[in-house]
Image: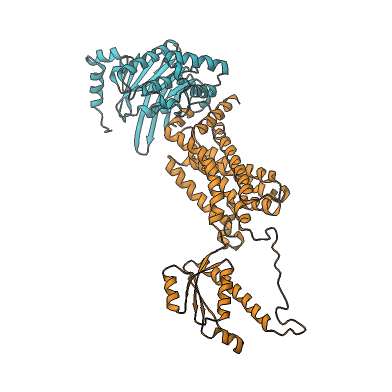
Amino acid sequence: MSTFKYVLQKEFQQIRRNPTIVRMMLAVPIIQLIVLPFAADYEIKQLNLAVVDQDHSSYSRELIGQMTASGYFQLANYSSNFNEAMGAVERNEADLILEIPAHFERDLVREDGATLALHANAINQVKGGLSQLYAGQIIRRFNNQIRSEWVQWPRYSPVEMVKIEPQLWFNPHINYHLFMVPGILAVLITMVGSFLASMNIVQEKEAGTIEQINVTPIKKYQFLLGKMIPFWVMGMFSLTLGLVIAYVVYGIVSVGPLWVIYAFSAFYLAAILGIGLLISTFADNQQQATFVSFFFVMIFILMSGLYTPVESMPDWAKVIAYANPVTYMIQVVRGVMIKGAGFMDILPFVGIIGAFGIFFNALAVWRYRKTV
Amino acid sequence: METPVIQVRELTKKFGHFTAVDHISFDVHQGEIFGFLGANGAGKTTAMRMICGLLTPTSGKVDVLGLNIATQTDAVKRQIGYMSQKFSLYDGLTVRENVTFYGGIYGMGKDQLKLKIAELAEKLGLEDKIDHQVSSLPLGWKQKLAFLVAIQHDPKVVFLDEPTGGVDPITRRQFWELIYEAAERGITVFVTTHYMDEAEYCDRVCIMVDGSVAALDRPENLRHKMGKETMHEVFYQLARAAQRQE
């Protein structure tokens, strides 16, 4: 036991002296949580709209006014010539063309119907699709509005007998940050855990100090545990920093009890550190360790349901997602912070992550050899 | 006759088809300075790594202090010291932290460590550098420090793998004074080197050529037998027979 105390003391001393580790521990949470949710946003604003107005009527102006007033569009080009508008798209100045044909107002009034055309630039399909969708909504609203202006109200309203009133539970304003920030918190401690831990043993291999360790009577588990505990503490620290940022920057307060997140993270970090240690027993130098952990972390994050729901993945991908510890971490953090899940709700996940942890750590201890 | 401190029998290591160490046998006795000589690639580091339990032999047997290195590894490890070719202290830690760590894992207590640190600082003249990071020390001091750390837990045997590589002649001289001091305290020293002047300082030398023992005796006896003036000439004649290229 006293041996272990010295091992631990030395690991903490080394980390304290390593400015890169300390910087990474502070910079990663701050950058990931402040930059990513703002940049990686599904909602698209400020789409550039090119209008081909061949009508020049009060209705066409009204429609354009509603489009730009929505906040989704800004008028980038206004002409009465389609080629001019297309040129703007080609020059990347416009994302969507709204074509208002001549006699738009006349047809609308006299013929009881008029046609508009929307041309979206679909090089970025998400952007193209969303711009169509937003424009469609605005035009529909415009349509309803003018219809109700003309209608002589009968006893029963001819418009929209059945109206859908959407109720969005847990995230009523579809606040994107509320969805993304807890997910990024999970990614964050994954990265801190796996990268730092895998680098650490490899550093000893590179420096040659591991050979000195191997001739001493240190037990394998003592050595690996000594490597793990400091990074476990650091992971918990990063999590705390992340929760503080979530509150200060985004005003996100966990609905469920925070201790549940900490309790789960305690198990989760142990599992992730096990993966890091396992990688370091294979790698001979820091480049190898970095590349291998980068490869796994990349796959883990993309297959974890951070951006796309696991339920909509193909079956083979679901298998990977459920064999991926990050998936559970994201579900737990989101469940607790947004939905207010309690410890009993996440208990099955604790079991799964516990099993991951035992598996990876046992493999790491088994793989680590004091003799070659 | 008392049991030898190290007993090597038919020790062999193969890497694929390449036999790095080929059925070597020898004994090392209590308190002697045993020189293990050979050109680069002769197999001396491989042999030494097997003797101190860092490498699993392909065949053969090693007893250290009467204990089998393969089965009683931990018991052996508590009683040996080792200094590798690569610098084995933590560059980022201070002298005090390094000494504390290595002493601590051998079970030395706080008071004992305090005493050791003071003694070590005085011996090396490092009193004012004790709280400096090891990386700031010159190479010669680092090597001497690494040696003193390797023997601070009073091992019965210490293994030194080319401990004086890359240091100047004056430092080498000082280093050997430290080795003699350790031997006087009763520590058996097993040292590999390719400096032939250092071979003269050893009680007995074992010259490895192509993975086998080419000669083993006291330096003066070897010179006598082969009719040479210096160990350098002795070594040159033996090594010329080598088939292996580096």
| Chain A representation colour | orange
Give the number of marks.
0
Visible in this render: residue A156? yes
Considering every residue shown, the one lying at the far right of the view is: A155
Identify the residue at horizontal 58%, vertical 59% (top origin).
A318
Residue B54 in view: no
Residue A78 image position (x, y, % from top left) = 48, 74
Q: In which quarter of the image is the C terminus of chain B?
A: top left
Question: Residue A214 placed where, x, y %?
Answer: 48, 29
Instruction: Give the percent coordinates (x, y) of residue B6.
Output: 43, 20
Identify by letter the chain in cyan. B
Q: Quadrant of the N terminus of chain B?
A: top left
Left/right placement of residue A161 relative to residue A231 reads right
Residue B220 picture quarter = top left
Up the image or down, A54 lies above or below A285; here it is below
Q: Which residue: 57% across, 80% down?
A: A58
Residue B238 shown left or right of residue A156 in the figure: left
Q: Quadrant of residue B208?
A: top left
Q: Give the percent coordinates (x, y) of residue A73.
A: 54, 68
Depth check, front residue: A238 or A278: A238
Q: Could you say which is closer to the camera, residue B17 or residue A138? A: A138
Decide which of A18, B102 is in the foreground and name it.
A18
Q: Up-down: is A366 above or below A151?
A: above
